[in-house]
Image (cartoon, grey):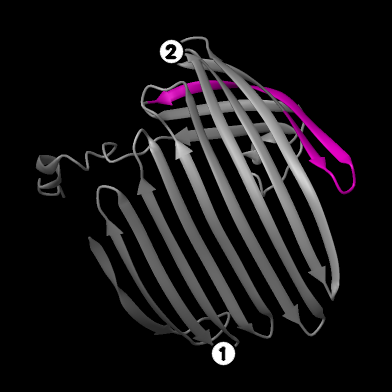
Amino acid sequence: AQASGGGFSGTPSLVTGDFTAVYTGAAYKDEEWSSNIRMEWRTSDTDRKVNLLMGAQRVLEKGRTVAAGLNFTQVEGTLNSSLLNARLSYAKRPLNGKWIWLDRLEYQEESRSDATGAFRARKLINSLNANWLPDRSAQIAFQHGAKFVFDTIDGAGYQSFTTLFGIEARKDITEKIDIGLHLGTLRSWSSNARDYQVGMSVGFKVADNAWLSVGYNQRGFHDPDFAGAEYRAQGVYLNLRFKFDQNTFNLNDRTQSQLPLKP
């Protein structure tokens, strides 16, 4: 088990004046469970702010993992606001399986109020991503998203329902180059409006555990609430991916970690 203590600081700020901040946090980890929590409180000449961050993960058998997270922020002052984000996810990544998938359910709530009026937005978002590996040189990825939105602006209520569906196929040309074709559609059911996306990309292995993709979408759309949708916007995009684990920097090599630092 691991634990981290708290802190206290006070320093002048050129923007907001003096402020005082206090935080504390803790973390725990064993073979099956890992969790962490951090609480922050700050007061200044203009406002008071509270942050709460929590997360937990449980490793199940056969490559399955379940995780949950919570972020909460509240500000009181001239502008009162709060932000809540709660997530629950389930992943299945079997070692030798052809299917890999992740499902995430997320609830977001944001509110703001000042002398000019009040605003409140609530979102319930589900994102499902699945990968099928027919062989070692090809893969097909599927994405499905659904979003309910409930807004309240100065007492008036608004709601909408949006869905996303996407598919991408990738094929290795060589050990260091692959190509991909991707299609997608975004539909707003309340207004019966649709947007489409079609494009292709070329990927390059620039180093071990590092992959660079350059793509172009002839048509596209953008919805920041769906994970990965930023690569469906119209035009050229660049995607750089890295893989990090406990072996990347020899963190498990005790002989390396005990060597003296070089000047």
* Element carrying mark 1: loop
* Residue 201 lies in the magenta-colored region: yes
**Image mark for residue 62:** none
Check disc 2: other Cα within 10 Å, few if <14, some if 14-19, many if 20+.
Answer: few
Residue with the mark numbered 2: 175
* Residue 227 visible at all: no
Q: Residue at x 52, y 52 (%)?
A: 88
Q: Position of residue 255 (x, y in %)?
A: 9, 41
Our reading of the magenta stretch's main secondary structure is: strand
Q: Residue at (63%, 46%) from the top-left corner?
A: 126
Farthest-out residue, bottom? 45
Q: Tell which circle, 1 or 2, labels the residue nearer the N-terminal end.
A: 1
Left/right placement of residue 218 relative to residue 31 reads: right
**Magenta residues (range):** 184-207
Kindly identify the amino acid type of the residue bearing the numbered disc 1: Asp
- What numbered label is drawn on residue 45? 1
**Mark 2 belongs to which amino acid?**
Glu
Viewed as shown, does residue 176 lie left or right of 248? right
